[in-house]
């Protein structure tokens, strides 16, 4: 299967949603509006391990280790949170829960979003 998250046909999968998805440092390579990505992901997975470098991370990496990524579409933390929050809530460090999960088992106040 060769497709994007936005174009993914959910009928391809028999048993949705999956318990866990991993999205580790890939979203920065998607051009344009990320809302369709997270709208689709929150229907596909109950929980998402999510990590992405922000604009501040790239500034720090350039200063500390002379790292630059010419292929990344750099976004701020605020921009990422704006597209993530309608679809997922944070329940731990780098761990998101789909807002479609009705009865959350996560109750740790430190990481839990309202």
Image (tube, rainbow, N blue to C red):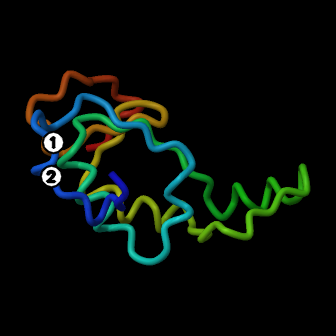
Q: Position of residue 9 (x, y in %)?
A: 18, 57
Q: Position of residue 22 (x, y in %)?
A: 42, 37
Q: Which mark is residue 65?
A: none
Name the secondary structure under disc 1: loop
Quadrant where the image shows the C terminus: top left
Q: Which residue is mark 2?
A: 10
Q: Position of residue 92 (x, y in %)?
A: 41, 30
Q: Quadrant of residue 113?
A: top left
Q: Residues within 10 Å of mark 2 (few under 14, many from 20)?
A: some
Residue at the location (34% across, 28% down)?
A: 109
Residue at the location (15% across, 52% down)?
A: 10
Q: Depth check: 23 or 54 in front?
A: 23
Residue at the location (27% across, 51% down)?
A: 41
Marks 1,2: beta carbons within 8 A: yes
Q: Position of residue 57 (x, y in %)?
A: 70, 55
The residue furthest front is 1
Name the secondary structure under disc 2: helix
Circle count: 2
Q: Left or right of 37: which side holds 13?
A: left
Q: Is residue 66 above or below residue 109?
A: below
Residue at the location (34% across, 60% down)?
A: 3
Q: Quadrant of residue 8?
A: bottom left
Q: Depth check: 13 or 104 in front?
A: 13
Cα–Cα gap, marks 1 and 2: 6 Å
Q: Residues within 10 Å of mark 1 (few under 14, many from 20)?
A: few
Q: Is residue 4 above or below residue 73?
A: above
The residue furthest bottom is 32
Q: Which residue is mark 1?
A: 13
């Amino acid at each position: 299967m060769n497709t994007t998250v936005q174009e993914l046909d959910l009928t391809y999968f028999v048993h949705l949603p999956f318990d866990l998805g991993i999205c580790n440092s890939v979203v920065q390579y998607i051009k344009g509006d990320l809302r369709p990505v997270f709208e689709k992901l929150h229907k596909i997975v109950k929980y998402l391990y999510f990590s992405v470098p922000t604009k501040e991370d790239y500034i720090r990496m350039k200063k500390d280790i002379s790292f630059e990524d010419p292929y990344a579409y750099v976004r701020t933390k605020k921009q990422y949170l704006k597209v993530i929050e309608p679809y997922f809530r944070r329940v731990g460090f780098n761990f998101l829960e789909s807002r479609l999960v009705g009865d959350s088992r996560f109750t740790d106040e430190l990481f839990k979003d309202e």
